[in-house]
Amino acid sequence: MQKSFRYLSALVLLVVATGVRAAPANDNWASRTPITLPFTSSEPNMYLATVEGTDPDPPCRPVNRDPAQYTLWYSYTTGTSTEYITLTIANNKPVSGIVSVYTGNPTDGFRIVSGGCSAQSDTDAITRIAGLRLAPNTSYSIEVASYFSGLTSNDPLAFSVASSQQYVVTKTADTNDGTCGVADCSLREAIGASNANPGVVLIPAGTYKLTIVGAEEYLNATGSLDALHGMGIYGAGMQQTIIDANQLDRAFALDPVASGTNHTSFAIGDLTITNGSSSFSNGHNQGGGGLALDSGTDYLGMERVALTANHATRTGGGAVINSPATLRDCVVSNNISDYFGGGGLYIASDTTRHAEICGSTISGNSITDQFGGAGGGVYAHGTLYVSNSTISGNDAIGYGGGIYSQSGSLHMASSTVVLNSAQTNPNRQDAGAGVYMSGSGSNSIIDSIIAYNTAADLVDPPDCGLLDNTIILTSSYNLVGSSGGSSPGACAFSGTGDVTSATPGVSKTLADNGGPTQTHALLGGSPAIDAGDPTGCKDNSGVLLTTDQRGFNRLEGVRCDVGAFEWHDGIFQSGFEP
């Protein structure tokens, strides 16, 4: 025994003497390092960090880059008030870093903070999330990762977290004198100051009308508000802070002069964007009446944002988002696109990353292109996740009145798609007025209602259509008004718990039923009540949805309800609407 002890002791001394290093202490989520602000760390052993199977893949990971090869974890808990933080990986070239911020845990699932993800820029020496909003009394997990597989002991991690520089708007007038002072700072001037030194722009309640003429100038001097670097932009509430573009230009252009190698993070919350206008002749030919993010490499998080009454003569009447994005508790309504696709939203990501819409309502949008415009509500190019959302009353001249999914895949969960329409398209017989899928990936629809949608050509399946029978659709526990019968391209909906050709018992009125967005209530006696997955309604990542779109408890009855709305007996008047 003594001999063995002496041998082990000598081995330990040899390891220490030869300088063999150990993996960092915060190599996994369970051992994450708690931080206080300001926080600075220089970790020499990043190259020894490992990746756990439960580590989330950051949504902003650059396209065609390997998944994370090394991950470290930190934790931060806020105090009693809202906080705004900036996270930075400095001297980033060797590390090829990604920083992302989450709530949740490996068991119940991680939830990315809106705007809380940034990757290394090929044109900048740092990775940075600037002006990220954190809720009071909340614990957050911060993942710092590298996707470069060749890190060595010569590649230390330099990571810091600090309170953000704040730029508080003090007047509603659209002025641009180049300064953002304590007593004199317009919205344009605040964004200009954040362009120079990225932080957070805070906008009090009020209507902020753009009045400086000059579209597509992209220096934040005229026309649109041009955010040239990543930042947070937050209002006082979706109904309280109104950004009125006055039909001079789109309201916001995010990273408009990007070279395509930027990896910038934007967060926008608690405001309305309205009266934006983009024309075909403008530099951003992809359109975006209210907002445009064209870079393809950035990341956008929007939370409690309304895009309403905007117009694009090209794509994306409400917004064009050509990057991974997360839209939570948002409203996209009454926007118009004149060309190709996306009356409400045109979202283009890629098959290795995704865009996500959750807790949101997309209604009353239209695509008017007479040559077969698609996606009255949403045109998605790439991978789109939709959960706990309502897609209602949108219209496409061609197909996909509610959602058109092209060159990728659609994954929809616990959502309600009703009252959308598709006009006669002489070139097709599979309009799919509610949902239309033509991508090469595998699609899934679960725990959702698709009903009351109409196609002008009676041969077309009104609720759900596929390009052809090679399109893969996995379904379960859905309530579909019309299966489309033998119509070409009709979605089968033959999975466990699927019900077709049934009266859905859904109110045809889009109304304020509680929560930040309007919904279609279930009516008493609806077959959707207690008809969801017996193991619980889940989002597209398999995470249990504990609330419906409004924030009401999902487990009110024996089982969760199908669709975005959970019936609560006694709160809404009973009645069955045919």
Image: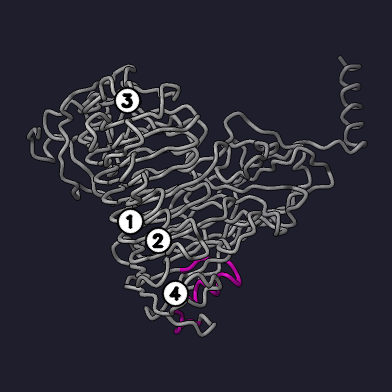
Disc 3 is placed on an element classified as: loop
Question: Callout 2: few (<14), some (14-19), or many (20+) C-alpha neighbours within 10 Å?
Answer: many
Disc 4 is placed on an element classified as: helix
Mark toward the start of the polypeptide (1 vs 3): 1
Q: In the rendered structure, are the residues bearing label 3 and label 2 in contact, judged by CB atoms less than 8 Å apart? A: no
On residue 336, which mark appears? 1
Figure quadrant of the C terminus: top left
Residue at numbered disc 2: 289
CA gap between label 1 and label 4 equals 26 Å
Q: In the rendered structure, are the residues bearing label 2 and label 1 in contact, judged by CB atoms less than 8 Å apart? A: yes
Mark toward the start of the polypeptide (3 vs 2): 2
Identify whether 301 is placed above or below 15: below
Q: What residue type is labelled 4?
A: Leu
Mark toward the start of the polypeptide (4 vs 2): 4
> What is the magenta range?
181-201
Mark toward the start of the polypeptide (2 vs 1): 2
Q: Quadrant of residue 122?
A: bottom right
Q: Where is residue 100 in the image (x, y as percent from the top left)?
A: 57, 47
Residue at numbered disc 3: 490
Q: What residue type is labelled 2?
A: Gly
Question: Callout 1: few (<14), some (14-19), or many (20+) C-alpha neighbours within 10 Å?
Answer: many
